[in-house]
Amino acid sequence: MDVILLLELAVNGIFVGLMYALVAAGMVLIYKTSGIANLAQGALAMTGAYVVVMLASAGLGLPIWAAVPLAMVVMFAVGAGIERLALRRMIGQPVIMVIMLTLGLEIFLRGLLPGVFGASVKRLDIGIPNAPLFLGELLVSRAILIGGGVSLALILLSILLFNSRFGIIMRAVSDNQTASWSVGIRVERAIAVAWGLSAAMATTSGVLWGATQGVDWSLSLLLIKALAIAILGGLDSIVGVLIAGVVVGLAESMATGILDPIVGGGTRDVVASVIIVVTLLVRPHGLFGREHIERV
Amino acid sequence: MFFRRAGISHTRYRDERQIWPLPIDRYTVFLIAALLLAAPFLIDRLYVVSYLLPLIIWSTAALGLNLLMGGAGQIHLGYGAVIGIGAYSSVHMLRAGVPFELAMIGGGLAAAAIGSIFGAVAMRVKGLYLAMATLAMQYIVDFVIIQFPAISGGTQASLPVPPTSFLGFPVEGDRVPYYVALVICGIVTLFMLNVRRTAFGRALAAVREKDYAAAIIGVDPFRFKLLAFWVSSFIGGLTGAVLSVCYYRTIAPEQFHLDLSIQLVAMVIVGGLGSVLGVFFGVALILFAPILLNQAVALLADQFGMNLPMDLRAHLPLMLYGGLIMGFLLIEPLGLAKIRNNIRNYFLVWPFRHSRQ
Amino acid sequence: MALLDVNSVEVVYDQVSLAVKGVSFEVPEAGLVALLGANGAGKSTILKAISGLLAPERGAVSRGTISFEGEDILPLDPPSRVRRGIVHVLEGRKVFEHLTPAENLLAAATMHSDRTMVARMMDHMFTLFPRLAERAKAKAGYLSGGEQQMLAIARALMTRPKLLMMDEPSLGLAPLLVDEIFDIIVRINREEQVAVLLVEQNAVAALDVVSHAYLIEQGRIVMSGSAAELRENPDIKEAYLGGAGTRVDYHAVKHYRRRKRWLA
Amino acid sequence: MALTRRTMLTGAAVAALASHLPVRVAFGQDRTVRFAFMQDFTRIYTFVTSEYSQGQRDYITLVNGRGGVGGYTIVADISDHANDQPRAIEAYERAKAQGAVLIDPLSTPVARALVPRALEDQINMITAFSGRSDAADGTAFPYVLPLTPNYWTQAGLLIDYFKQQDGGSLQDKTICFVHIDTPFGKEPLPILEKLAAKEGFKFLAFPYTPPGNDQSAIWPQVRRARPDWTVFWGAAVGQTVALTEAVRNGLDMSRVSSSVWLSESDMEVVGKDQTVGVMKVEPCVSGHEPKIIQDILTEVVAAGKGAGPQDKVGTSYYNYGVMLAALMVEGVRRAAEIAPDGPVTGPWLNAGLRSITAFDAEGMIPPTTITPEDHQGGGYGRIARWDGEKFVPQTDWFSANQDIVWQEIRKYSEEFKKNGK
């Protein structure tokens, strides 16, 4: 096992982990305001990527630098609209039912987008060349480097957001919706903004992943990995998500490099699962999740 | 035509605690049981084999999961893996010549043993964190099944179920598998209906509401959660055996993937957590809505000559299906069982809608 | 004109069960009024109907009007009612457990865009409740019951209310703390000219501070009057004030029945 | 536990009515042959199904437009099973009740699960490029018909082509095999290992976790192994991501290949000019050149009876659909020759399908002969390279390493014969 390969795997793993963390950060944003795990997050990423494709190559023919921000605006409206039309009516209902509703939304979006825009895989070219980039003997992929960098920047931005006054309101809303109402917080508006921001972030993830794998329904599968990372990080901590993303990305990359040849099978998901279980045994609220304050 | 509760006032707690306090309910149950028993002779085999049979089997599994989710408040995203363990253990036993009756129990025990090991590990965490821990179980079991050809059945990864018999009847054709599944489902349903009335059921409810409060009144949350995992996994394993012998006839790893786990969780939630009747509604909706919507869309498109693009026509049922789940939850966030109860209560007190306090 | 006017309000839960049956009362400008009654009488439901917090519990006002400063507030959502000047301190405190006391206060100031004013108000709250200042860095969930109650009141005051509605402020607190909380309520009422609508089971403490009270039972107002009148009422004495001094004649069946009605 | 007596009665009435819905179509009344194309339009196989199905339906429209075959018209029922077993079983049972004599599930898990039912009910199940590879043995699986080179054959073809290119010997060469870690992806492993032992090349397998959207940790290892040839084996996103990663890692595209599951749309996604040189196994001619495709364009598409967008006509997967439909129709033609008046049943069509002889679909496919023993049709295919616009054949139709392939087929089919029934 040579050092260069390990290094290469590590670099790849960290940046891919950051890209996963971006999807997870969108989930955390929603969890932090409304206390529900949005199972439609992957589908939102898929929707965002479809919107970009429609605005750019296949549809209006906008240049990519215009299509992506425009799609983020559109998706902000879509996210806020979902909150307005569906989630708002569920405020105060059992959390598990609201989560189920988002699963229904996931199925709906997975039917809507491929149904309307076509199920075949669509190309999304964001102008990152595929040609190999060597740093000495180390090969890094430009797409992953840029994707990871963009993800990191967006995640840091959302950390800033949570420490602002608006962040306090969002945290108050997640803590207790009724109490938030009672002191005049516009709970619905806060949640709608969170959904909007989350959908816009999902769009970015959708674009970053779609640029590599093409755009079709399978982008919605990002959900599973994002959920794992969000929970490992602690569901309501963006910092946690950042670290969990890197940990999972690194571990998966290393497992693929070191364990796979020994076991002769794809150990990636299993290794990630084991890490998550072990971490939860030591810290039942994830790496940075808040504890449940229990008073009798 | 509708019935009222008028004139029924219980004088003993035993009456109040009956499973079906109204005579009409009892008659209805008997009628449904009789219809189910006679179904293979009454309706087309297509509906028995590809609607009633999966409905019964999935309901059995969902009932087992509901014990954990509705009864003990523990979410489980690896129930598909539990069923898989039951299926693979029992099929391997059958192939080794063990009679089906024993293999079924064996599958249940294997699933219960492995399931409660994971349960014990997952016990420290709650809510969505528990969901994640059980999801990890799903991945680990999937991995083991796929990576060990001895379990999955070689390169082809499909394991045919050998011919077998149940209580002397060969399990083949359309009817015997149906009755086997019906018997198991009946037993599990009766168990689930009664469990709430036992000390075990009440202890579970206490643990579900607040486990540390339960601990204070002397209910050991760890013990009862573990027991709930055990019983629920046993039912899962049992269902796995029935599923492979009576329905699939060849088992493959894909049949027990995450999709199945999510499907079952959806059935329990949409039906109504903790409701036995709701489970059947939930299973029917989640299992059949995609099929029926597909047929409906195809029929409409053909009848009215709608020239839909192929992709849209193929995906329209999926959209409708997602919309249906959302729609039901928006109308009644407590699930299908609650919808039924609302309607029933409405009629029970009609026309005095504010009479019950 | 009264500040708050509640007129024959009916509340229905789940569209089936009637929890409040035609309740009418009013709170004058800067007044201090109590709703008394046993557990489950419907007092909290009335407060929620006024603050608009029934919806999450599947309840709704099915009949009657509620007007605040002469304006019908029923069509407004809860945050708009807070902006009109009605604030509701929920039963069981319900502070934002994972936020610090300072963040709790800040979260309640969403309607004020003037940041210096918000900062001034926060200072004011910390002088009003010095105990909170001591624990400004702790998570609110770890404060003691009394401290949480103070935080809840301070948080409500951050909205600059005209009417402060308090649901069982004495619940689960030691008698000494109860006195302290009631002192604060009186001070707020006098010094800041904030009207207070108090819901209490602890009639002794409540009748000491309020000017007027209504007695609620099974969703109906069964008695009302000034605090002094109610204190002197033999039934109230018997049921809520520990029956000091009066001997009840159990043969007086009519009397007994009337008393029984409140206890139910 | 129904709501009221009224709903109960209504329910009973509905159930009674439903049980008499016309699910059964009387056999043999009119001269039709019913095919059930139950496929996955909305889940795992979306990458192929809509084009494949379009090809199948266009060809059947073509045949019916010409008056059918052997006096029979073909009825094709399309339905979506979404790769979900209960839905597939429902679709299967419905097809059976409606009198379908052939099903085409186009899904490996579904095909595998339906094997016992198809064998028991004597319904011909087409498992082209899917299902069990050992179904090529017609003696063990009389009603399961791949009709096309199975994965073992495809692997054998590729290795043989590599050998031809390297001057007749693979001694001490390195071949990397990147595959999705599912039963489908692992399937070629035994053949490749045997060939490695026989030809003396170094064989390295790299499994990736499904669905394969992230393979960034796999391909650096492949690059470092300095392979002489690389084969990637997956489907859907796994394929495009594999190709992208291969490009990013600077592998020589002219020494990278895949199975039949590579199409123009994958090239489009990765970038048409970046993948020049990449190879695939071609089971039939792609593009517009074959006469059948020309006929479809003039008689079906130009007449406005096409089943989908015109620009999809002639893509790889569209042509696979046409190829399979042509083989099925040829089966009907043969069956009608053997027994002109039916009755149209599974065994009737089975006899036809298993007597297809040297059928080449007017030059579109390699001459295919299906016998009761060999359901694979001889294992012919060719290697094609992407030139930036289309796949260009590099070889003629050829067959290779069938001895090893058949050893493996027999090994598993014997086992199935022993345990399956």
Image (tube, helix red, strand yellow):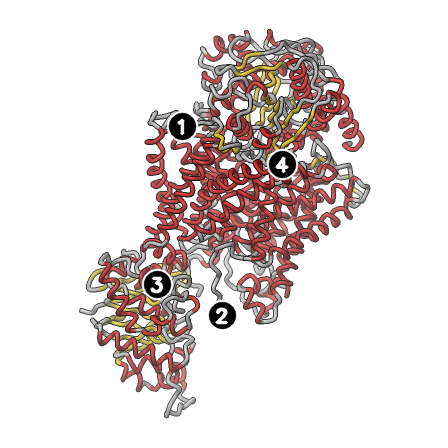
Q: What's the CA distance linking mark 4 and mark 2?
A: 51 Å
The residue singled out by tag 4 in the image is B50
Please state, as top left, top right, bottom left or bottom right, where the N terminus of chain A lies in the image. Answer: top right
The residue singled out by tag 2 in the image is A296
Left or right? Give the position of D164 relative to C252.
right
Q: Residue furthest front?
A: A136
The nearer-to-camera label among 4 and 2 is 2
The nearer-to-camera label among 3 and 4 is 3
Give the x, y percent position of residue D382: 62, 14
**Number of marks in the image?**
4
Chain letter of the residue beneath label 3 in the structure image: C
> Which residue is nearer to you in this view: B21 or D122?
D122
The kind of residue tagged 2 is: Val
Tell me the SS state at disc 4: helix
Q: What's the CA distance linking mark 3 and mark 4?
A: 57 Å
Give the x, y percent position of residue D387: 51, 14
Can residue A28 be seen here? The reply is: yes
Q: Are marks 3 and 4 in contact (CB under 8 Å)?
A: no
Q: What's the CA distance linking mark 2 and mark 1?
A: 58 Å
Decide: few, some or many residues near mark 3? Use Cα within 10 Å; few <14, some 14-19, many ≥20. many
Along the polypeptide, which appears first: circle 2 or circle 1? 1
Asked if residue C257 is positioned above or below residue D247 in the image, the reply reads: below
The nearer-to-camera label among 2 and 3 is 3
Chain letter of the residue beneath label 4 in the structure image: B
Quarter of the view holding residue B80: top right
The kind of residue tagged 1 is: Gly
The kind of residue tagged 4 is: Ser
Quarter of the view holding residue C10: bottom left
- For image coordinates 48% across by 21% down, the residue present is D274
Left or right? Give the position of D91 relative to C22.
right
The residue singled out by tag 1 in the image is A127
The residue singled out by tag 3 in the image is C104
